[in-house]
Amino acid sequence: MTLELRAPHDVATDASPAPARPDRRGLRGVLDRVAERRAARRARRVDDRLRELDELVHLLSDARAVVERGWIQHAWFAYVDEHGRERTATSAAAVDVQGRPLVGACLVGAVVSAAGGPHAVHGPRVQQALDVVWHALARDEGEPVLWCPAPDIRMGRVRDLTSWNDAGSRTAPEVGALLLTAERVAVHESARLQELRVARA
């Protein structure tokens, strides 16, 4: 006689699968579908925000590269005009730089340049990048970023960044280091958002 040995963890082949939860009908079903649609919209918003933060990291890295190529003070941009002469442009004359070879930029100008140039100065990418840079300057790196402040507050922050850039003792490596810190701030924001998504799942 042959004995058949079965390991303790073997599962009987006639085990029935767990029954699926039936769709609820009536008001409960409607509420379930509404909740599912809301969850899907929330997930899409989170995905969109994560993509934006990833783009911000790249933008700030590009801004750091602009500073490394040439950093200036007391103006936004240094560029070569149509006669081959090097000129500077403040924020008021930033449009003069569009299409010209850029040879230097201040902190704010580097962010604007990395986002596409003066025509992008009022766009959301520049504004959000400057929010992150100001946070890197004035707040602890791990704190949540305050996005979309009031216009007068945002202008005050740009003045803060400009004053910091133009300080007599400031150096290009310090400006590059601030932009690198801003990159880390954006990465922290992305990680915080992903943790929040997991907690809500």
Image (spheres, grey):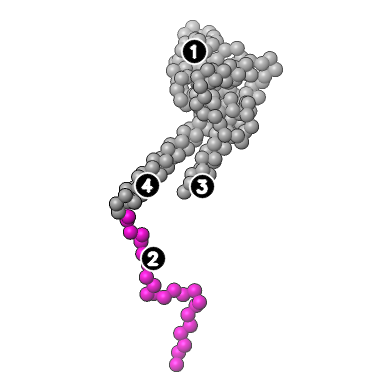
Closer to us: mark 3 or mark 1? 3
Magenta span covers which residues?
A: 1-24
Mark 4 is surrounded, within 10 Å at the Cα level, by few (under 14), some (14 to 19) or many (20 or more) other residues, namely: few
Where in the figure is residue 131, as x and y percent of width and height? 54, 26
Which quarter shows the N terminus? bottom left
Closer to us: mark 2 or mark 1? 2
Mark 2 is surrounded, within 10 Å at the Cα level, by few (under 14), some (14 to 19) or many (20 or more) other residues, namely: few
The circle on residue 36 is 4
Where in the figure is residue 5, as x and y percent of width and height? 48, 83
Residue at image location 37% in from the left, 47% down from the top: 36
The circle on residue 18 is 2
Q: Is residue 62 visible?
A: no
Amino acid type, residue under disc 2 in the picture: Ala
Depth check: 93 or 9 in front? 9
For mark 2, give the secondary structure: loop
Residue 159: image quadrant is top right
For mark 3, give the secondary structure: helix
The circle on residue 94 is 1
Amino acid type, residue under disc 1 in the picture: Ala
For mark 1, give the secondary structure: helix
Residue at image location 61% in from the left, 28% down from the top: 136
| N-term mark: 3 or 1 | 1
Q: Is residue 190 above or below residue 134?
A: below
Amino acid type, residue under disc 3 in the picture: Ala
> What is the C-alpha distance between the residues marked 3 and 1?
45 Å
Amino acid type, residue under disc 4 in the picture: Glu
Q: Is residue 128 above or below residue 17?
A: above
The circle on residue 199 is 3
Residue at image location 48% in from the left, 46% down from the top: 200
